[in-house]
Amino acid sequence: MSAPIIFLDFDDVLAETRAPRLAALRGALSVEGVEFSDDSFDDACLGLSFAGAARAAIRVANITGRAADETTIELAALRAARAFGESTARGIPLARGASDFVRGSAGVARLGIVTRAPRRDVDLVLSFSGLADSFECVVSAEDYTGQEPASDPFDIAIGRMARGQPVTIGGGIALVASLNAVAAARAARLHPIVVGPVSPALAFAGDGYLTSLQGATVANLMRLAAGAGVR
């Protein structure tokens, strides 16, 4: 039997990025007079690239005109990415239980990271944590610039894994922490399992829910994906 495939989102599954991402996006858009609430960020912006998150925040704020044009959005995304990169360089903690889960699962499952975070930030956190060798592939913001959310980032990751060993489509798991990531995982025929202190609506949006990765194992993730219950 082949090893199961498990993809982790970098944001709020592997690393605690919500606060610095929120601050980075808010600062970048405030220059254009765009304001949004924490709840709007959680509902509309999580799981997207900085450009996608900027578009979502502008849409939620019902902003039109220059602040909503693509040039402004791209510039805001660059400012947000730069601010987030500075936070990453100062150090972003891993999510609770993430390190033990990755180290314990690397020999049992095929692990990958699928994220809309910039690759340099992912690599920096992996380097600091010593987890880089645990992942078979990393798909980041630079690998896909199309419509969001979409299955494409997961499809790219599955394709990369298939180069080394055949992949069974439809049985993989995606550990996610946003509605956008749930939608993308489902579109790729993966089982989304939501992780972290999230809203009830998000907790029940996936095929299972974990309050954290503390104590999680590949076996209990497979049971969740099969509909055996919620932990």
Image: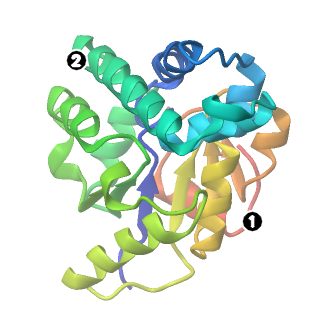
Residue 227 marker? 1
Left/right of residue 1 with respect to residue 194 in the rendered view:
left
Residue 89 marker? 2
Please name the residue shown 48% across and 43% down the image. Answer: 49
Q: Relative to the observer, which residue lies in front, 4 or 183? A: 183
Q: Amino acid type of disc 1?
A: Gly
Distance CA(mark 2)–CA(mark 1): 39 Å
Q: In this view, does 115 lie above or below 83?
A: below
Left/right of residue 160 with respect to residue 169 in the rendered view:
left
**Residue 97 seen anywhere in this rendered image of the structure:** no
Q: Is residue 215 above or below residue 32?
A: below
Measuring from the top left, give residue 101's x and y in whole percent. 39, 41
Please name the residue shown 36% across and 68% down the image. Answer: 157
Q: Relative to the observer, which residue lies in front, 84 or 218? A: 84
Measuring from the top left, give residue 1's x and y in whole percent. 38, 85
Residue 100 marker? none
Q: Badge 1: few (under 14), some or many (20 or more) residues near its Cα, within 10 Å?
A: few
Please name the residue shown 32% across and 60% down the image. Answer: 143
Q: Amino acid type of disc 2?
A: Ala
